[in-house]
Image (cartoon, helix red, strand yellow):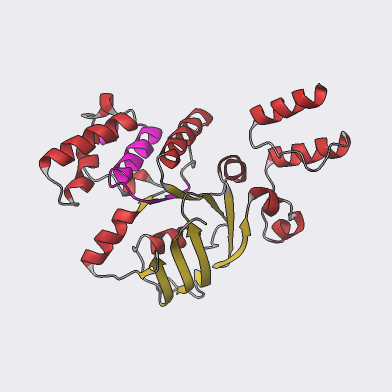
């Protein structure tokens, strides 16, 4: 059985001046090795959950823990916490702090109090892993949005977190940039990092995630594998959430061609093509 990493227990958070809680008695846990998509309408609490998970906000009530160790909010404890959990913001400008690509990635490493030799080694490794060698000395303001996202993500991963949180990473990216991001995320996950992505993109979530969480009015209302979640169409409609296009297409095919319901649900166009070829014989 996989280890439980991050856990929220009866967590409440209300923004200053807010009329109702952004998180309202939130309970959930994250299992190691998963690829998790967090879904929900605007205002459901997705970003707030990520900010609390990273220790940027402190709940007014409830407990947040990592492997049964409760989060503390002194400077030393938060620094230790953020070596386990990394957060990539929706807007990369919010976390790019230096002049060049290499300087920005190195900034987080200096905060870890590493030796110069180890910083140099880890910086070279992360530049290579993210394909940023040619951009190492490039000023950050010269980069495209996709490149800035990659640099911000590289800076987070330089700290080698066990859990990576991403807030709307596909926002404003074109299809090529989204494909590149998927490749990066698959590589990061294959290296052993657990991933949690907050997103509005149902199709991206369906293609990428192996576990779905749905947040509504600050509460976790649904969780499970994609096939189980998207089968509950009426419940999703009540939450004002759609089903993925590929899921809908497959359901129509299963019905019109009288295919067995036991067939594997395709998550990509390629998988759909392969299954149709098998059906055609």
Which corner quadrant of the image does residue 116 belong to? Answer: top left
Which corner quadrant of the image does residue 272 belong to? Answer: top right
Nearest to the observer: residue 154 or residue 77:
77
Nearest to the observer: residue 204 or residue 226:
226
Residue 208 is covered by the magenta coloring: no
5 to 140, vertically: above or below = below
- Relative placement, left or right, of 241 versus 92 is right
Nearest to the observer: residue 215 or residue 157:
157
- Relative placement, left or right, of 130 versus 62 is left
Please tell me which residue is depicted at 64% across the width and 49% down the height of the picture: 226
- Relative placement, left or right, of 148 versus 238 is left
Please tell me which residue is depicted at 15% across the width and 51% down the height of the picture: 113
Q: In the image, residue 143 lies at what x, y percent?
A: 32, 31
- Name the image quarter holding the C terminus: top right
Please tell me which residue is depicted at 75% across the width and 54% down the height of the picture: 233
Residue 166 is covered by the magenta coloring: yes
Q: In the image, residue 274 lies at what x, y percent?
A: 70, 26
Q: In the image, residue 7 lies at what x, y percent?
A: 45, 66
Q: What stretch of residues is rendered in magenta?
A: 139-168
């Amino acid at each position: 059985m996989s280890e439980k990493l991050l856990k929220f227990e009866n967590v409440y958070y209300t923004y200053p001046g807010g009329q109702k809680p952004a998180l309202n008695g939130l309970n959930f846990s994250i299992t190691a090795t998963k690829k998790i998509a967090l879904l929900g309408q605007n205002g459901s609490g997705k970003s707030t959950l990520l900010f609390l998970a990273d220790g940027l906000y402190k709940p007014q009530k409830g407990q947040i823990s990592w492997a049964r160790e409760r989060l503390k909010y002194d400077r030393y404890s938060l620094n230790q916490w953020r070596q386990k959990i990394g957060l990539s913001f929706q807007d990369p400008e919010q976390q790019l702090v230096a002049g060049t690509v290499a300087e920005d990635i190195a900034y987080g490493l200096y905060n870890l109090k590493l030796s110069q030799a180890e910083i140099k080694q880890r910086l070279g490794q992360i530049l290579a892993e993210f394909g940023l060698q040619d951009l190492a000395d490039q000023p950050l303001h010269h980069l495209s949005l996709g490149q800035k996202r990659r640099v911000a993500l590289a800076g987070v991963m330089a700290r080698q977190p066990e859990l990576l949180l991403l807030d709307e990473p596909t926002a404003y990216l074109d299809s090529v940039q989204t494909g590149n991001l998927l490749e990066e995320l698959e590589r990061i996950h294959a290296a052993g990092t657990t991933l949690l992505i907050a997103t509005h993109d149902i199709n991206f979530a369906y293609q990428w995630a192996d576990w779905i969480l749905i947040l509504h009015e600050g509460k976790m209302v649904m969780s499970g594998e994609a096939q189980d979640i998207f089968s509950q169409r009426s419940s999703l409609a009540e939450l004002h959430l759609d089903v993925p296009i590929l899921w809908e297409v497959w359901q129509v095919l299963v019905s019109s061609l009288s295919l067995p319901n036991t067939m594997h649900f395709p998550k990509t166009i390629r998988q759909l093509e392969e299954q149709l070829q098998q059906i055609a014989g």
